[in-house]
Amino acid sequence: MRRGCLWLACWLCACGAPQDTPDDGSTRIPCASRRDCPGREGCLDGICGPCSRDRDCATTEYCSPLDQLCALRPGFGDECALNGDCPLGAYCVQGFCRAADQVTLCLGDLDCSEGKRCDPANLVCVLDLGCDRDSDCAAGELCDLGTRRCRAACTPENQEAVCGFGLVCTAEGRCVECFRDDQCGVGRSCDLSTFRCKGPNACLTSRDCPYGQVCNLQTLQCTVPPPACLDNRDCPLGASCDTQSGECRSSDCRPDRYEPNDTPAQAPVLKAGRQDELRLCPGDLDWFGVDLARGDRLQVIVDIDFFAADHFRLALFAPEAVRLLQEDPLLLDVTADMGGRYLLRARSSDPERAYGLLLKISQGVPCDNDALEPNDGPLQASTLTAGRVVGLALCPYDEDWFVVQRPAGEPLEVRLDFDPFQGVPYLDLIGGDGRTLLLRSQAAGSPQTVSADGFAGSRFFARVWATQALSCRYDVTLTLGARPAGR
């Protein structure tokens, strides 16, 4: 189970702070986020009230300059929050109930098109506006409180690659810069809503800036926007629009030394070492090959402007170039389960992006899928019947899902047995909707157990997962009815 530090739990829960009554007799409600505030009020410096910037509102909202209150962005509504709020057969998409033929169902972000992500609550593709809290992100990811983007949870081993310069990894896997003002330089303070140091007029994204200003990502200061463009039609011939900054930029992009490598067939073969001065031009894909033997561990560290990482993706494919193994903006870490030529694919939504790669190849331990794969989500869940299933495998960045049926009134328990020296996976009990987390095992080692006692319903899901690149074998046991003595 993820365990955060007391300071973070205290802040996110507002530490049970009492309501503040100012001199005018009104009540000031403390808040940790917009969700704590009534009506359209924003959360500004820990107090509900008028907003001054988009960050004071939810990601699906903006701060209206007309009344300094939060308003829904175009394309978002408040008709529903979950699929269950909609008529039978309809899905909740961005706050609106939509018919099944108008939505794209998903199990993860890779099932969605560019610019969209998978809503983990409703399993539909939605516009990717970022996150407000960890539950907006996929398993193994946390919401970066500064950039409002989902990122892989960090560890002491990958802190430098995942967090970047000047940030440290907390015990719960979150990248932070500060906890106190004295950890920041002169004239700067620690913003406890993002755990970043800030100065006057500082920003991480344009949502941090007052109405009419944008965040200059080079200086991290709010400034008056440059001459705006919305798409390439607003720019002169030979230039393209950078929709993140609103700037027209020259389309004269110089290809790097490996071009053309726009398809798997054109992929140059890379060896372990550093690859500098790589470049993606508008609409470009870069493909590279890496020859690996079974058991080779490949680590790829991306060298890129940290604030451009949100628009960059590096993916690794198995030798048949169909099976996606891993995708991340900053770090790949995979052990080959078969020998052959693996393929790397780099892409960016920026008009032009310079980057570098550092490839490390060492000896690892391969992980072979078990016979129940693919069972990586509720739509692919394997049916679990009473008894013990042995020799199952949890591979890096994998999730194993099982669906179980409970006879009316019968107790139900799922047990996970494994070798703790291989690492500790997590065991969750999920409701029959495939979304609601009912229970997470609290054990620190083997075995892990969850029980449906006290929960209504006859259909449940069991999910086995890990927050890091864990490889382990395990057995799962379903017990229906009275549990044996001694259990």
Image: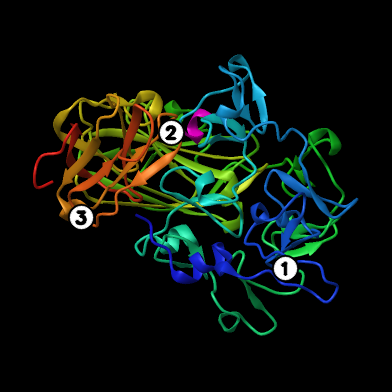
In reply to whether residue 109 is colored magenta, the answer given is yes
Query: Toward the viewer: 120 or 434?
Result: 434
Helix, strand or loop status at disc 1: loop
Helix, strand or loop status at disc 2: loop
Query: Toward the viewer: 220 or 15?
Result: 15
- Residue of label 3: 445
Q: Is residue 348 left or right of residue 270?
A: right
- Residue of label 1: 202
Q: Which comes before the other along the chain, label 1 or label 3?
A: 1
Q: Give the magenta-colored segment's residue range.
A: 108-112
Q: Position of residue 343 (x, y in %)?
A: 38, 35
- Between the residue at mark 1 and the residue at mark 2, the CA separation in whole angstroms equals 42 Å
Instruction: Work out whether residue 182 can be spotted.
Output: yes
- Between the residue at mark 2 and the residue at mark 3, the CA separation in whole angstroms equals 44 Å
- Between the residue at mark 1 and the residue at mark 3, the CA separation in whole angstroms equals 44 Å
Magenta-drawn stretch, dominant element (helix, strand or loop): helix
Marker disc for residue 267: 2
Q: Residue at x 65, y 24 (%)?
A: 97
Foreground label between 2 and 3: 3
Q: Position of residue 342 (x, y in %)?
A: 34, 35
Binning the other alpha carbons within 10 Å of mark 2 as few (below 14), some (14 to 19) or many (20 upward) gives many
Amino acid type of the residue tagged 1 in the rendering: Ala
Residue found farthest to the top: 101
